[in-house]
Amino acid sequence: MLSVQTPKQNLALLCACAIALLLTAAARASDWQVRISPDDALYPVLDLSQASSGKGVDARYGDGSGMVAVDIVAAADGERVGLRVSVPGLTELAQVQTTLPRAGQRYTLRPRLRWNRRALASMTAPQKIVAEFSLTRGDAAALSQRREIRLHPLGEAPYYVRDGKDHVDLGWIFAAYADPQSRVVDAILAQVSERHPFLTLKPVARTPAQALAVAYAVWEVLQIHGVRYADEDPGIARGPLVWSQRVRLHDDVWNERRANCIDGSLLLAAALERLGIRSVLLLVPRHALLAFYTGEKNGQPIFVETTLLGARQLAVRPKPGFVGELSLIDSDALDSFSAALVAGKARYAREAAGFGQRKPDYQWIDLATARSYGIIPLAAADAPTTAAPR
């Protein structure tokens, strides 16, 4: 299940692990320390998935996520400090200007990184970069530090971090890749409207049959468009410190007409969220499933095996009851969707025992819960370098 801790609490825990490591090196430390977590790497999705709070927390100053931070001990009461951070891939310098109230107290400066999506869009693999830090204290000359770090692509999602006995569940990050306002979702729903003009494509209360019908209609458009399952492993890192996966953004799925299990599940989840249907992304070892709720009182979710998207020549099945809600039916799409529901239910039954055991490869990511925790879509469709759906 989604962690009981909120994303901000989990990020704070992740940063706390980095602080602990820094303090062990205090003998050689100066009075200001740069830390970048996790593992001296930057994952832009960790910043872009969360809206700015506009407020400092406790003894921390700045509005950043804390992935890049500077710990500093105040030299005097009311000491004025200014931090400037230059990192390739930003639209502007990251800055914090503040006053530290008490001498001898440790404070944390957290600059907010404003990422340049045009630059990020061209990245397909991690890159070694140099980050430059400049700190001014009162009227003294600026102090500088340089750090070589790894910058990861926007499409790489770190979902679990382990540091010794500590671990941080970041599975909620996948909710950021489901963008219900994507122009790809616009294109899908426009075609659904043409094919099934009597379906309601607004977030309204639906009967179970109506919910299944609109879910099928989205699946049908993707299959008719030519989107097919891409048999590839999205896993990038599987420990021992960081677990991460590659996620293809909605525009890429639509334009390339291919999706692995997680890409297809997230695009379907985005469309269902737009339609007001609660959806869940399920991670199991080396695989992902989609689940959604039909609105039936006390009902269990419907599980969807998205690897069957685009499948043809499947076994003939009885027509499901929701077909009465539809105007046009593509027989291949109906067969593959029906098979996906059967396979999804069976796969979940095999994997159900793994959930709730705090394992990195078992994640239950409810999009509605993630949104309530402050996870926002990446809005990848607004990236200037992304081609329009065709």
Image: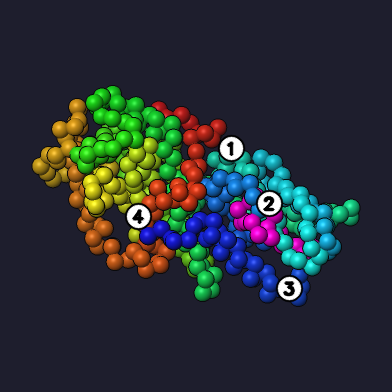
Q: How many marks?
A: 4
Q: Secondary structure at mark 3?
A: helix
Question: Disc number at residue 289?
Answer: none
Residue 89 in percent (x, y) is at: 64, 44
Question: Mark 1 or mark 2, which has the lower sequence index?
Answer: 2
Q: Secondary structure at mark 4?
A: strand
Residue labelled with disc 2: 62
Question: Mark 1 or mark 3, which has the lower sequence index?
Answer: 3
Question: Disc number at residue 26?
Answer: 3
On screen, residue 252 versus residue 98, left or right, reads left
Question: Mark 2 or mark 4, which has the lower sequence index?
Answer: 2
Circle 2 crowding by C-alpha within 10 Å: few under 14, some 14–19, many from 20:
many
Question: Mark 3 or mark 4, which has the lower sequence index?
Answer: 3
Labels 1, 4: front one = 4
Q: Which residues are magenta?
A: 57-74
Labels 3, 2: front one = 2
Residue labelled with disc 1: 118
Residue 161 in percent (x, y) is at: 51, 64
Q: Is residue 134 visible?
A: no
Residue labelled with disc 4: 282
